Image: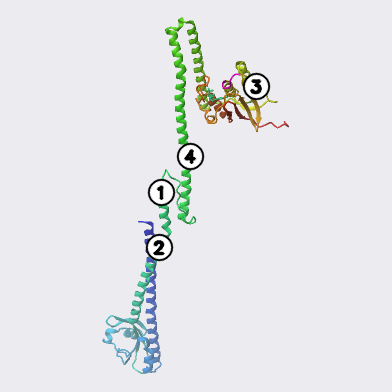
Amino acid sequence: MPIRSRLTLFNALAIGVILLVLGVALFFFVREALLSRVEDTVSSRALAAAETVNSGETLDQNEMERLSLDGVFVILRDRDGMVPTQTIGLPTSVEDLDTLWNQALQSGQSQGGTIEIAEDTPAYLYAVPVEPMDGSARVVEAGQSYEGVHRTLETFGTVLVFVILGALLLSVIGAYLLARTALSPVGAVAGSARKITESDLSERLPVANPKDEIGSLAATINGLLARLEEAFARREEALARQEEALSRQRRFVADASHELRTPITTIEGYAEMLEEWALHDQETAQKSVSRIREESKRVREMVEGLLALARGDEGAPLKLESQDLSAVAAEVVRTARAVAASKLTIEYSSPAHEIIATFDRTRIRQAISILLDNAIKYTPAGGEVKVEVRESDGWAEVAVSDTGVGISEDQLPQIFERFYRVDEARTRGGAGLGLAIARQIIEAHGGSIEVQSKLNKGSTFILQISQPPQRSSVL
Ligand code: ADP
């Protein structure tokens, strides 16, 4: 059963019971009051008449009329019950009607009781024994029919029933309207709630009055929806990230296999050639062996690169130490000069003092080497490569700049991706892993790597790692 009907029904029942109890109580109260007024009137008239008789006076016409006002009747009886005076014509014989006079006479006490003065007409009768000096009267009776009382009660009862029914009807209608008005926001809330689906959690429930129960419920549900929406968005994001990581991994494996296949196929080809005929041709054999060595080196480098990336992905621990970054950079420059001095000049501007930072020496050396190797690789002979170590806002920086081929703006964002090479033709045997490894190393240190480049002008790669807090100069 809907709440609205239940509220209405409960209200109707409660008010109905209250009205019924009140009505019945009121009816009986009024009835009692009316009956006892009849009895009081009757007994006081009987006593007044008795007093008159006892004092020896006769009840004359006037007195009788006065005593029998309001439908009261008065009867005087002698010791045998005979009636010398009465104000009412009682239809049946005295004995049948009335035994009260006898009881009063016998007991010498006043007696009150109900008698039937006609069919279905009860009346109250009060008998008082009297002892006048003269005269035969021995009992004075007064009585009044209950008929008037019954008629009044009948009218009162009818009015009461109609009033109760009217009040009940009004209260039921009122309760129904009240419940309908109070619950109407529920319909609106339910309608809006139906529109909310997993795919669209942006819908909110209407809050008609935030201070009432339904409003506060809707506001609470809205809060819940907001949290759900947030959680769903986070889940979607996480799923997208997961999906992206998975597809990156798949791409990585496919790329790695593809990249490894080329040099291995080359090695296989030269080995076959050697096996089949080239061994006897000194020059071809020499060329084949050197290509095999070259390709093997490439495979080794690629495998090493892949291993480095895999270790980084796994989050291999860093051996962090607070040390001088410029010393590491100088070391890398020294090694590079030994190899590339004939091709181009490598300038190193050493800072005025040590640049202390917290880092894993081997890894950072590897990252700087990658940048420097690239600078050498992508700068034509006669060019210039510069390495600078410096401090900037709590960061230790290594900047590697060259006057090489540069990178176009649209390719800049991709160069840190695994296996990405700007131009296969111009890459000198690189697998496109270097910058990915360098970035992974720097990010593991909580640092960043940035690049500025102009096509055919040169590039500058800047890596930053944070410096430990400066020691106080007082200590
Ligand atoms: P690779 O092994 O091919 O050098 P990297 O990941 O080190 O792979 O570099 C990715 C690409 O970025 C390279 O193919 C190259 O085209 C470009 N690149 C990297 N460093 C430089 C540079 N100093 N100057 C110009 N291009 C560069």
* Discs 1, 2 touching: Cβ within 8 Å: no
In terms of sequence position, does the residue under pointer 3 or pointer 1 come before the other?
A: 1
Give the distance between the C-alpha atoms of the residues marked 1 and 2, in whole angstroms.
Answer: 28 Å
Please give the residue where the numbered disc 1 appears in the rendered image.
Answer: 195
Residue 205 location, x and y as percent? 45, 51
- What span is in magenta? 377-381
Give the distance between the C-alpha atoms of the residues marked 3 and 4, in whole angstroms.
Answer: 49 Å
Is disc 4's CB within 8 Å of ligand 1? Answer: no
In terms of sequence position, does the residue under pointer 1 or pointer 2 come before the other?
A: 2
Residue 62 location, x and y as percent? 38, 94
In terms of sequence position, does the residue under pointer 2 or pointer 3 come before the other?
A: 2
Q: Is residue 188 above or below residue 136?
A: above
Q: Is residue 5 above or below residue 315?
A: below
Amino acid type at circle 3 is Glu
* Discs 2, 4 touching: Cβ within 8 Å: no
Q: Secondary structure at mark 3?
A: strand
Say which residue appears at 47% left-offset and 54% top-offset.
207
Say which residue appears at 49% left-offset and 10% top-offset.
287
Q: Is residue 471 magenta?
A: no
Please give the residue where the numbered disc 3 appears in the rendered image.
Answer: 347
Select label 1 or label 4 by which is in front. 1
